[in-house]
Image: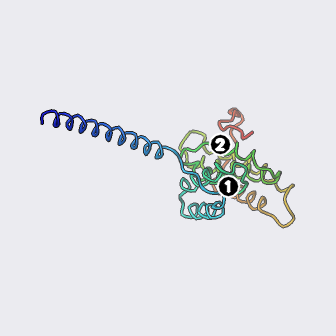
Amino acid sequence: MELFWSCLFQKGWTWILACGMLTCIDYKAKLKAMSELKTINKEAIPRALEKVDRYRLLNDPAEAESICRDILTIDPGNQEALVSLILTLTDQFNKGTTIQEANSLRSQLKDDYKREYYSGIILEREGKAALLREFPDSKHDAYEWLKDAMEAFERADSLRPADNNDAKLRWNACFRTIEKHHLTPRPKEDRHKLHQPLE
């Protein structure tokens, strides 16, 4: 009888240890699965792009950015997603997002007009973000960003389709922002630019 209980006890512990190992393995597998991003289907891209627009309208660019990155993971050359990601990043310029990634994405646009137009958009939004910063010379920075944007919009306008005046509209908006906030160039004795050129 003692031998029976001894065997049963040993087998019981073996079973418990085996279950424990299986549970541990299962937990590790679940943990690994939770630490990896899930991939969307290519067929879902149009619907995902609609959600990007919706989140931007809801003033939630971080959510829109996340969806853009999911789309570009499976379709890196998707031009609409690239444009949307540029815009969602510029939406966050006043929250610490830097200009470098937006500019890098702009260089991936295939259309010459769009590259110049979104160059202007990036510069314009960096200029407007500079207006919110309470740094010395931030208004001079804003002026320089906006003037650079206007030059980019002029280049875009020379490449535009006949029925597209978007570059002119943005140029006018930059001009009015400069006037509204009484922005001026940096004084001659302090001509070194504090902002980094886009190129």
Left/right of residue 166 with respect to residue 25 in the rendered view: right
Task: For the N terminus, give its image quadrant.
Answer: top left
Instruction: Give the residue drawn at x 54%, y 53%.
Output: 62
Task: For the C terminus, give its image quadrant.
Answer: top right
The residue carrying pointer 2 sits among few (fewer than 14), some (14 to 19) or many (20 or more) residues within 10 Å by Cα, namely few
In the displayed orientation, state which residue is furthest to the left: 1
- Nearer-the-camera pick, 9 or 55: 9
At mark 2, the secondary structure is helix
From where the camera sits, is residue 182 visible? no
Which residue position is annotated with label 1? 81
Instruction: Give the residue drawn at x 41%, y 40%.
Output: 28
Q: Amino acid at mark 2?
A: Glu
Q: Earlier in the sequence, mark 1 or mark 2?
A: 1
Instruction: Give the residue drawn at x 83%, y 56%.
Output: 157
- Nearer-the-camera pick, 123 or 173: 123
Across and down, in percent, residue 47 comes to 62, 64
Q: Amino acid at mark 1?
A: Ala
Q: Work out whether 17 lies above or below 86.
A: above
The residue carrying pointer 1 sits among few (fewer than 14), some (14 to 19) or many (20 or more) residues within 10 Å by Cα, namely many
Q: Work out whether 100 lies above or below 83.
A: above
Instruction: Give the residue drawn at x 61%, y 50%.
Output: 69
Q: Quadrant of residue 185?
A: top right
Which residue position is annotated with label 2? 101
In the displayed orientation, state which residue is furthest to the bottom: 163
CA distance for labels 1 and 2: 14 Å
Left/right of residue 8 with respect to residue 171 in the rendered view: left
Is label 1 in contact with label 2 (beta carbons under 8 Å)? no
- Nearer-the-camera pick, 2 or 199: 2
At mark 1, the secondary structure is helix
